[in-house]
Image: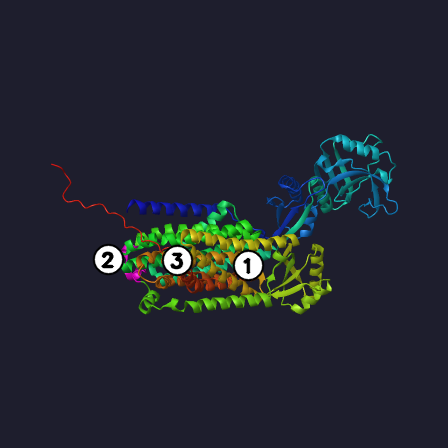
Amino acid sequence: MSRAPMWRAVAALAVIATSLLLALTMAPRLGLDLRGGTQLVFETKDSPTVKADADATDRALDVLRRRADALGVVDPTLVRSGERRIIVELPGVLDPREASAVIGKTAQLNFHPVLGPAEGEDRDAVADESGQKLKLGPVALSGAGVTDAAARSDPQAGPGWFVTIDFKEPGPWRELTGKAACAPPGDHKRRVAIVLDKEIISSPQVDESIACEVGISGGTTQITGSFTPQEAQNLAVLIKGGSLPVPLELVEQRTVGPTLGADAIAASAKAGLVGVILTAVFIGVVYRLVGVLAAVALACYGLISYAGLVAMGATLTLPGLAGFVLAIGMAVDANVLVFERAREEYGAAPRRGLKAALDRGFKNAWSAIADSNITTLLAAGLLFWLASGPVKGFGVTLAIGVLASLVSAMLITRVLTAALIARIGPRASGIGSIGRVRTWLTRRDPDLMRGRRLWLAVAAGLLVLAGAGLVTRGLNYGVEFTGGRIVEFGTSKPVDVAAARQAVADAGFPSAVVQQSDDAISVRTGQISADDVVRMEEALDRSVGEVAKQRDELIGPSLGEELRRNALIALAVALAAQLAYLAFRFRWTFGAAAVAALFVDAAVVVGAFAWMGKPIDGVFLAAMLTIIGYSVNDKVVLFDRVRELWPVRRGEPFVRVVNTAILQTVPRTVNTGLGALFILAALAVFGGDSLRDFAVALLIGIIVGTLSSSFVAGPAAIALEKRTTQPPPVPAAPRARPARRDGSGAVV
């Protein structure tokens, strides 16, 4: 064994062993849409005295973190996103009312003396816990002076609960309670008001044992009353959390039940297993032994991708699961490119042997593999940069999958095939012939580009049809892009959607959009509160039988507009990035032709969703950017072959060169497309409602993108080349071979 294959084998074993170790010793970090819980996104706002910049947001984040810790949530996650956003993830918290009410209290925490009951229409009066209006004195102590607060119970003193408060300095509290103690017991002036968000959260009386002007010393105090354990805990959380430096606005909220998350994991696992089995059988039938070895490498790919995810600490979301499964289909692409090039090399020089053909297949396919994977990484990067929430996880998963597919195809597949290819015959190897499709195309040699004007006219007709769908039906924007609330209720039995719609209307939401899918009811409304959701759930319980809230998403109007704008920017930047990359790697005419075909692909998918009335949301954005990246792969392979053929066929018309390149790349295009379609079909069947629309968008996009490579990008490149003055590429100069020596070279 030469040195290079030996090092490849050692590297492959090291990668597999490391991945196996990471997979067995580290647990994945599941997103809330898979394990259940609530995600809140707050946006800081300017106050009269403080600007909501990154520093103020960081200070607000510290306050929220103390409040979340005091709530007792297991493993809460709080991070700053951008300059003004704070993302709070609370696993296991399924009632967003309590979480947002306690964590997101926005105003200053202050302690005031009570001057007495309010008289007349006093606008500055504040209602106490019983609803009585009180007139308060100026702030005597701010929340910044509180160091700790806790809910406690003392069985020896009685069954009740109380709240203890610790102060940084004992003086202000001693002075405040000393003045209050001068009033007789039962007088309002003997009370101290604790005010948060212009609301009295507690107004305890100073104990009768405290003397006038003496006050409570020691820097700690107790608030007693008829508290339940939860009431005492909430009061302690609010007091301990202290003051937020700037107000907060809740702009997004997502709640997912644990049952829905478990079902999603099971459905994705089933889809992935079925898709992988179908893909492995397919490439095994088409490419025989090397196909079987590629299937083994695909299994290693899954292991490497999973290990990469857990090693990076990436959060695995539902769209991320879809990306993980989809990347398996895309990983087939590199293997197919290599095997098709190896078939060509063996057909051109069978005397060199199978191993030499396979080596040259890996070498000659590298350019197209690198270009196509870079374009997919561009799409994944845009998803991570511009998307939010679970879709960002899809971008991370897709990027890791692309890198893992390169390792599995260019390293593991190569090691496995190199070890066995010399021991078998050409027929059993899978690369001993160019295949039936290539043989038929070579014999018939159809002139597809003769009808290039017809193909462009068909593409124009599809654009008109898509535009008609946009004009007549419009786009069904999801709440992510419009703002509003969508709630999904699981039902224990089939439900009449008309009865559910009437129940929601009777609850006070006549304009809500109510839809039924499988064993669930989804309700889409405008900006409603969590209490409204509870009222809606109770109305459905009474009308259609027991229901259980599975998913609850709230998007603020400002965030919806921002997400919609970012989606358009993402698509525009994706097309521009692909054009720039293709123009850099090839010619500007090739890049423009590819982007024109990509525009057709995107327009057809958007038009199809308009005609079908399917939602346009963040998951659809992930599908669109994936389609762009996947479709570019086809164009890259085609133009890479054109670039290879053109210099050596300078005597032929360019239209003939393009036609030949299309015919030579058809087997790769068809086989790669079928590999992805197996995965997507499994996702559409087994993935559930949440992944079905994603799979449908990709199915349409990949089919259209595969056809547009030949029938839009090719004719467009021919038309553009007629209008450019750039000369054709020059054939590469052959390498100079060392001169052959006669004799031994010894000098006597």
Label 2 belongs to which residue?
351
Density class for disc 3 (Cα within 10 Å; few <14, some 14-19, many ≥20) is many
Q: In the image, what residue occupies the spot 45% across and 57% down?
A: 592
State which tag comes first along the sequence, 2 or 1. 2
Q: Residue 639 carries which label?
A: 3
Which is more toward the observer, 222 or 354?
A: 354
> Can residue 41 be seen by looking at this rendering?
yes
The mark that comes first in sequence, 1 or 3, is 1
Left or right side of 310 for 505: right
Instruction: Please identify the quarter of the rendering in which residue 153 is found.
Output: top right
The image shows residue 408 at horizontal and vertical percentages of: 40, 52
Q: What residue type is labelled 3?
A: Phe
Q: Which residue lies furthest to the left in this view?
A: 748
Q: Residues within 10 Å of mark 1 (few under 14, many from 20)?
A: many
Q: Can you tell which of label 1 and label 3 is closer to the viewer?
A: 3
Depicted 314 relative to depicted 285: above or below: above
Question: Would you identify the image quadrant in which residue 533 lies?
Answer: bottom right
SS at mark 3 in the image: helix
Quarter of the figure with the C terminus: top left
User: Of 729 and 328, which appears nearest the observer?
Assistant: 729
* Residue at (29% x, 55% y) in the render: 357
Q: Compute the Cα span from label 1 to label 3.
A: 28 Å
Mark 2 or 3, closer to the camera: 3
**In the image, is residue 165 part of the stretch drawn in magenta?**
no
Give the residues in magenta.
421-433
Q: Look at the numbered discs 1 and 3 and tell me whether their residues touch, using CB distance below 8 Å.
A: no
Residue 620's disc is: 1
Distance (Cα) linking label 2 and label 3:
30 Å
327 or 597: nearer the eye?
597
Q: What residue type is labelled 1?
A: Phe
Query: Residue 622 at x, y = what percent?
Result: 53, 56
**What's under tag 2, amino acid-wise?**
Arg
